[in-house]
Image (cartoon, rainbow, N blue to C red):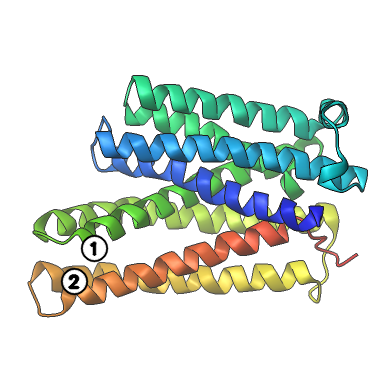
Amino acid sequence: MADGILIAARLLAYVLLLLAAGLPIHRLTQGQRTAGAGQRKVQAVLALAAMAVTFLWAVASVAVMAASPIAALDPATVQAVLGATPLGGVLLARFAALAILLLATLAFARNAAMAMAAGVALVTCAWTGHAGAGEGFTGMAHQFSDAVHLLAAAAWIGALMCFLEETFRGGDSTGRVLALSRFARVGTVIVTLLAVTGIANGFLVTVSAGWSPRSAWSLLIGAKIMLFVAMLALAAANRWWLVPALAAGRPGAPKRLARSLLMETACAIGIVVLVALAGVLDPSGG
């Protein structure tokens, strides 16, 4: 039971943190220095929800380590276990970053401040799972690579959410065309970073933990790669076909673009689910 709750907490944390970091990062790439009132409300909700999920992650982790049901844990046990393990410090750092994010959202409304605080909270995920288990130079390299991978993924997912919101809101397509065209350049950098760090992460995991092509971890990573390729294909279709069609005012272009963005978002969600599952599995199948 605790294992399932831990996986669910990891999944929710990834989703919330990717959005919390990705939305202000995307706004910055679009030249928006400050967030609007509605954007600040969303950011505050994401910060508060991520805090709650971080607490659940901590409790579920202790339950798994102690081989105890969550209901049987007491505060002293949770505090003692987290205080004696690196995970406690990581989750505390995440909680602090989320608190700063909430303060920055409510007091300053600067996208740069929100992106930095949320980015720090997101990067703490690199110190959990396989990357967090590494030691020495290899471990540091893995954690750095994973951190860059997470930030690049956040930028892509944040952009998708913004594009979906703009597409379903309707109205003049000129702004959407400009935003999508501007993102095309940023998207090239994002894809490059994801590909390079993804390969590096896979190599570093298998070097330190071993690898079996028949393990559940390998199957999940294979599925992740397939979804990533699908996202690339959809993004290419958007850039070279659907956005020009929208700019030209061709009939049905908005619906086709919306459908493509939904499919791309579904692939992204699928990848996050696979990552949450793979992070608790042994690559060697042991």
Image-based side of 65 in relation to 164, left or right: right
Instruction: Measure the C-alpha gap from mark 2 to mark 1.
Output: 9 Å
Above or below: residue 274 compared with residue 146: below
Residue 66 sits in which quadrant?
A: top right
Above or below: residue 264 compared with residue 116: below
User: Element type at marker 2?
Assistant: helix
Which residue has dot 2 on it?
254
Which residue has dot 1 on it?
168
| Residue extending farthest front | 71
Q: Quadrant of the C terminus?
A: bottom right
**Of label 2 and label 1, which has the lower sequence position?**
1
User: Element type at marker 1?
Assistant: helix
Q: Name the residue at 64% across, 27% down.
A: 93
Residue 276 seen in this snapshot: yes
Residue type, numbered disc 2: Pro
Image-based side of 54 in relation to 61, left or right: left
Q: Name the residue at 9% across, 57% down.
A: 174
Image-based side of 13 in relation to 84, left or right: left
In the rendered image, residue 4, in percent from the top left (x then y), is placed at 75, 58
* Mark in the foreground, 2 or 1: 1
In the rendered image, residue 145, in percent from the top left (x then y), is placed at 61, 45
